[in-house]
Amino acid sequence: MSRLMNRKPGRVLHLGLVLLPFALLLLLYLASSQARLADNPNDKLLPSFTQMADAVDRMAFTPDKRTGAYLWWDDTSASLKRLGTGLGIAAVASLVLGMAMLIPLLRNPLSPLVTVISMIPPLSILPILFIVLGLGELSKVMLIVIGITPVLIRDMQQRVSEIPTELLVKAQTLGANTWQVLIRVVLPQLLPRLLQGLCLALGPAWLFLIAAEAIASTDGLGYRIFLVRRYLAMDVILPYVAWITLLAFIMDRALKGICRALFPWFEPKGAH
């Protein structure tokens, strides 16, 4: 009999094992919700699936009586715009500065600066951003940029240090100058690592976005969650949280799919 650690589930069993914890959580929630609502039909802590479905219909498919807007989709659009802008700026900045780490004259002053900045809790400087940049879109985007860029740069620096020295020497021996080495040798090595890093940065990026929207915003997923919390509207909050989770999952899958399509030779650590 083979060891348990060496046994691999088949396709059907694998799918069942993946879905099992989610099914158990749903059943646990359903049972808890029914028990609380049976004791108190007006209980708001654990709304039923019907109540949450009604809330989604009201937020997503019924125009707001005051503005005529579909709040669910307006909030989603506002949040994704901020998140996409922040991720894009962070990606470009980390890629450029990561490539600069190959040059000692730039690496020596940049590396310790990035290390120190990466130690600053991003949420602690949120009030500073609001004071300096105002309460508009720029401060929210910059919180995402400041929150994830230093970590991405350090990851890029690590990848640069892993590039075989022989590869760089061969390129220079064949007559490549610094720019050619950066573009033809270093850049292809950093791009797949950058996509992998963005996947890992999605969680913190969403956290910074929700925090910024909750404090100073008039739209967005984080704004809506913290607006309705005063009414204990869990029938709205829980679907919004589930929707954010789904969006993050889709973005993660998309980034990994792009990485596999453009860089099939790249295999992240831990991949099988």
Image: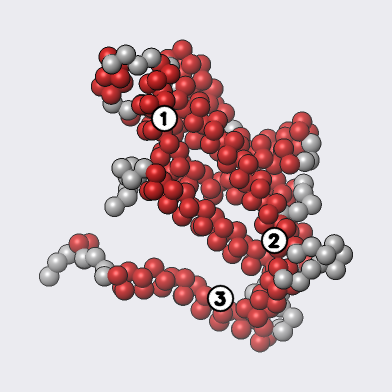
Give the Cα separation between the discs numbered 1 and 3.
Answer: 48 Å
Secondary element type, mark 1: helix
Q: Are marks 1 and 2 in contact (CB under 8 Å)?
A: no
Q: Nearer the viewer, residue 181 or 216?
A: 181
Residue pushed farthest front? 175
Secondary element type, mark 3: helix
In the picture provided, is 92 more to the left or to the right than 82?
A: left
Secondary element type, mark 2: helix
Say what amino acid the circle numbered 2 marks.
Trp
Task: Please give the residue where the numbered disc 1 appears in the rendered image.
Answer: 187
In this view of the protein, can residue 269 be seen by the observer? no
Task: Please give the residue where the numbered disc 3 appears in the rendered image.
Answer: 29
Question: What x and y, as percent, mark residue 124?
Answer: 66, 37
Residue shown at the point (43%, 18%) measured from the top left: 179
Say what amino acid the circle numbered 1 marks.
Leu
Give the Cα separation between the discs numbered 3 and 2.
Answer: 27 Å
Relative to 252, say whether 167 is above or below.
Answer: above
